[in-house]
Image (tube, rainbow, N blue to C red):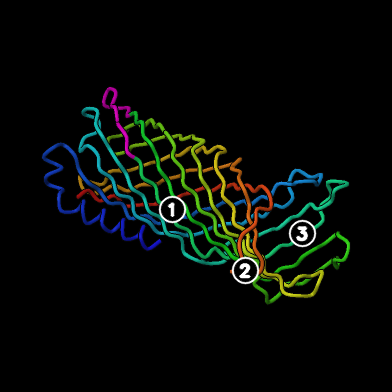
Amino acid sequence: MRNITAFAVLVIIALIPRPLQAQEQGYAFSLTPQFGIVFGQAEEIVYPGDTKAAFLSQLLWDMQPVLYYGLLMDFSRLDQQERWGFFSTLSLKNGIPGKTGYMEDRDWLSKENTDLTHYSKHDNHTRELFLLDFSPGLSFPFSRVLLFKTFINVSYMRFSFSGHHGYGEYNWPGYPPYVDYSGQKVISYIQEWLTASPGISLGCFFLGRFFAELSFMASPLIVCADLDEHKSVDVKEGSTTSQQFRDYMRGGILFEPGFRLSYTINKWLAATWDFSWRYINGTRGDTYKRSPIGRGGYVLVGEAGAGLSVINSSLGLKVRL
């Protein structure tokens, strides 16, 4: 995390001293401070070995919503309506920690049927949200009204959650039917993603000062790693549970439609609104376990999966340097 922040600072330092040189070549740098919200859910899955249901375990972590602040850095033609050109953007978003809904944990342990055997619900606290997106590409104007872009987006995402309090309901031999988890930190989860996606966009200049743009990305180039730590009291044995799971996954599908609307205030300033939905599904790989937390080696115990669905909306003020 610190290395990524340091990298972003170095990029800013590298860009700011050369605005005049860039403008002489028909290009300009811009910075857009942003403030927005992320609304959605992260998913953690364990697939069954010899049980009947589609999942052995499913955990859902709410982000409803997470507030964030960010910075968008852009290098592109001064007049994109004039001729084709190169562009690149670097976006950084950092979430504000807080309670962001609930996390739900479901298990289907039966070998005879698909009935739900374990269910628990807890307050979800988003401790960390960090998003980095880098997109280089080419832009092509048509009739000075339409602007077509093609690009590659490389994205790194990190989410960190913890589940507190709540309750559990159990339908399994040896477990009480109801457990109160008040006052306990039950579980924590870290999910990291690295993706690469080709994308296209089509924009339209209208009414002199407005620009509207639709974009779309899709890709199977996905890597995910996560860390799950169970810390609750074992309701069956009455002792402290301490289990740690690491998953390494890849593949699946990512798609992301987006929309941007900007209003040019003057030659130096523009107000922007961004809206997008990023969806990832079908990412699978191996899951490893060790117990207690922090001791011993990891043992391969099965197959895991991960998913993500987040809606992003932000306001920004674009400043041309």
**Percent position of residue 45, x then y:** 66, 50
- Left or right side of 106 for 253: left
Give amino acid for label 2. Answer: Ile
Please tell me which residue is depicted at 36% across the width and 57% down the height of the picture.
4
Q: Distance between the residues labelled 1 and 3?
A: 31 Å
Looking at marks 2 and 1 on the same chain, the residue that comes earlier in the sequence is marked by 1
Which sits in the foreground, 43 or 172?
Answer: 172
Magenta segment main secondary structure: strand
Q: Name the residue under label 3.
A: 119
Q: Do the residues labelled 2 and 1 touch (CB within 8 Å)?
A: no
Please tell me which residue is depicted at 37% across the width and 63% down the height of the picture.
2
Q: Which numbered dot is residue 293?
A: 2
- Left or right side of 105 for 81: left
Q: Name the residue under label 1.
A: 131
Give amino acid for label 1. Answer: Leu
Q: In the current view of this chain or complex, which residue is farthest to the bottom? A: 183
Q: In the current view of this chain or complex, which residue is farthest to the top? A: 143
Secondary element type, mark 2: loop
Residues rendered magenta in the picture: 136-147
Residue 171 located within the stretch drawn in magenta? no
Query: Disc 2 vs disc 3: which is toward the camera?
Result: 2
Give amino acid for label 3. Answer: Tyr
